[in-house]
Amino acid sequence: LNYQASRFLISAPTLAKCPPDDGAEVAFAGRSNAGKSSAINALTRQKALARTSKTPGRTQLINFFTLGDDSGHRLVDLPGYGYAKVPEQVKLEWQRHLSDYLRRRGSLRGLVLVMDVRHPLTEFDQTLLGWADEAGMPVHILLTKADKLKSGAAKSALQQVRLRLREWEDLVSIQLFSALKKQGLEEVHERLDQWLLE
Ligand code: GDP
């Protein structure tokens, strides 16, 4: 698939306002500031397709991108979570939207979960994995900002996350990634191809 041809389709505040639930899509989730927007921009080789966040947690919209191939292939940028200054009420609202989306979105083929390699598996990352498990939704984890660690430390972080998630190894795959160094792009593209073309 040609990820470089991706372009913005629509923003939706709720699941009800999403584009029609046909075709096939892959969604990106992650804690605010984990590097999700940078990952989407690197994967599509675009500078600002997904907005990198100056004010983390500001975006509460679900953003849809089309691969522009007329086959209904989409990338979906889910709201970042976990920003401390967001009121509890708003957090709960996002969580409800996210869990609804995972359970009900028929065209959703898989979830890419973006984590800072230095702070993997936050509490809400684990909640999200639990929901994905309940929904039988496969998850591909990007341990991003791998360039911030020496190669040995990055590899050991990868091993530790693999170990902690070994009970979910049928549903979950994990890799190192760096948007800055464009590390791991091919591996992600292969996974997305698998999901979107299956
Ligand atoms: P988001 O809130 O998850 O969308 O995170 P952003 O993509 O906006 O990134 C948050 C911050 O981390 C920004 O300052 C980015 O420049 C930085 N960042 C993102 N990805 C990487 C990476 O792979 N390496 C490094 N060194 N910094 C990154």
Image (cartoon, rainbow, N blue to C red):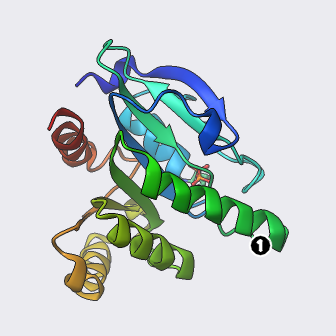
Front position in the image: 110 or 156: 110
Task: Return the x and y of residue 84 as percentages of the image width and height.
Answer: 77, 72
Is label 1 within 8 A of ligand 1 (CB to nearest ligand atom)? no
Q: Quadrant of the N terminus?
A: top left
Q: Judge whether 118 appears above or below 142 on screen.
A: below
Judge from the rendering whether residue 190 lies leftward or rightward of residue 106; answer left or right.
left
Q: Amino acid at mark 1?
A: Ala
Q: Quadrant of the C terminus?
A: top left
Identify the element where label 1 is drawn. Answer: loop
Point 28% across, 85% down: residue? 160
Front position in the image: 77 or 119: 77
Task: Return the x and y of residue 135 as percentages of the image width and height.
Answer: 36, 64
Task: State whether residue 41 appears in this view.
Answer: yes
Q: Judge whether 105 appears above or below 89 on screen.
A: above
Judge from the rendering whether residue 33 lies leftward or rightward of residue 57; answer left or right.
left
Task: Return the x and y of residue 181 as percentages of the image width and height.
Answer: 37, 47
Point 41% across, 60% down: residue? 113
Point 37% across, 29% down: residue? 22
Q: Judge whether 65 appears above or below 126 on screen.
A: above
Residue 56: which quarter of the image?
Answer: bottom right
Front position in the image: 107 or 65: 107
Task: Please state the total of marks drawn on the protein image.
Answer: 1
Residue 117: which quarter of the image?
Answer: bottom left
Residue 193: which quarter of the image?
Answer: top left
Query: Residue tagged by mark 1?
Result: 84
Q: Judge whether 77 appears above or below 121 on screen.
A: above
Judge from the rendering whether residue 124 lies leftward or rightward of residue 141; answer left or right.
right
Point 48% across, 39% down: residue? 76
Task: Return the x and y of residue 9 as percentages of the image width and height.
Answer: 54, 21
Front position in the image: 60 or 54: 60
